[in-house]
Every structure is written in structure tokens, then in C-alpha cells.
Amino acid sequence: MKWNPVLNAVAAALYISAIALFMQFIESLRHDTPDTFLDGVGVISLLVLSVAVMAFLFFYQPVALLIENRRAEAVSYFLKTLGVFAVLTISMLILVSMQ
């Protein structure tokens, strides 16, 4: 599989969007119910899952390149992924602020 920093950044944005939609859906179902122990467990589990997904999307390939002693490529890959994600994030924030 050919790794691509743009696809990784887009995948991260799509993952975040999917989680936000899921959370909005859950909130619409349970908007007037008290929080429970399982809510806390679910939130922390979601946090751990999200950290793992983001770590994979942002760091797996750069670390693999570092292990192969390809430092310049690793830094470039990471910065490209981060840059594309930053552009997507800023674009989303601009769109939200225009509403």
C-alpha cells in the first residue's frame, strides 16, 4: 500500500466528523437523562480509541521511516500530514464561523 500524507489527514478529518455526528446522535437520544457510570466509561474509551487512531494516522509512517534511517522523509511526511490537516481544520473553522 502506498502511504499518502494527504489521505491520512483527510482520514483524520473524516474520523473526527464521524465521531462528532455519532455524539450528536447520542445526545439527541439522551438529552434529558442523567449521566451514569457507563457514560464516563464510554467517553474515556472513545478518547483512548481516538488517540490510537490519530497516532496511527499521524505517526505510524514517520516512525517507520525513522526506523529505516530516512529522517528527512519522516519529517517531511509528518509535516505534510500536519499541514493538510491544519488547512482542513482552518477551513472548517472558517465555515463554522460564517454561519
Image (cartoon, rainbow, N blue to C red):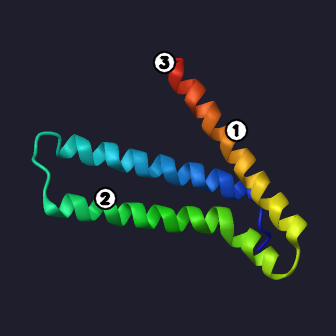
| In this picture, residue 31 sits left or right of residue 75 | left
The residue that appears at 58% across and 48% down in the rendered structure is: 13
Q: In terms of image quadrants, where is residue 74?
A: bottom right
> Residue 57: percent from the left, percent from the top?
63, 63
Residue 43 - label = 2
Q: Nearer the viewer, mark 1 or mark 3?
A: 1
Horizontal side of residue 75 vs 86, given as left or right: right
* Identity of the residue drawn at 73% across and 54% down: 81
Estimate the spatial distance between the alpha carbons at disc 1 and disc 3, rounded to whole Å. 19 Å
Counting other residues with Cα less than 10 Å from the Cα at mark 1, is it few (<14), some (14-19), or many (20 or more)?
A: few
- Amino acid residing under circle 2: Val
Which quadrant would residue 21 be assigned to in this image?
Answer: top left
For this orientation, the residue located farthest to the top is: 98
Where is mark 3, residue-wise?
99
Q: Position of residue 95 (x, y in %)?
A: 57, 25
Q: CA distance from mark 2 to mark 1?
A: 27 Å
Residue at 82% x, 62% y is 75
Residue tagged 1: 87
Looking at the image, which is closer to me, 42 or 21? 42
Task: Tell me if mark 2 has few (under 14), some (14-19) or many (20+) residues whose alpha carbon lies within 10 angstroms of its own.
Answer: few
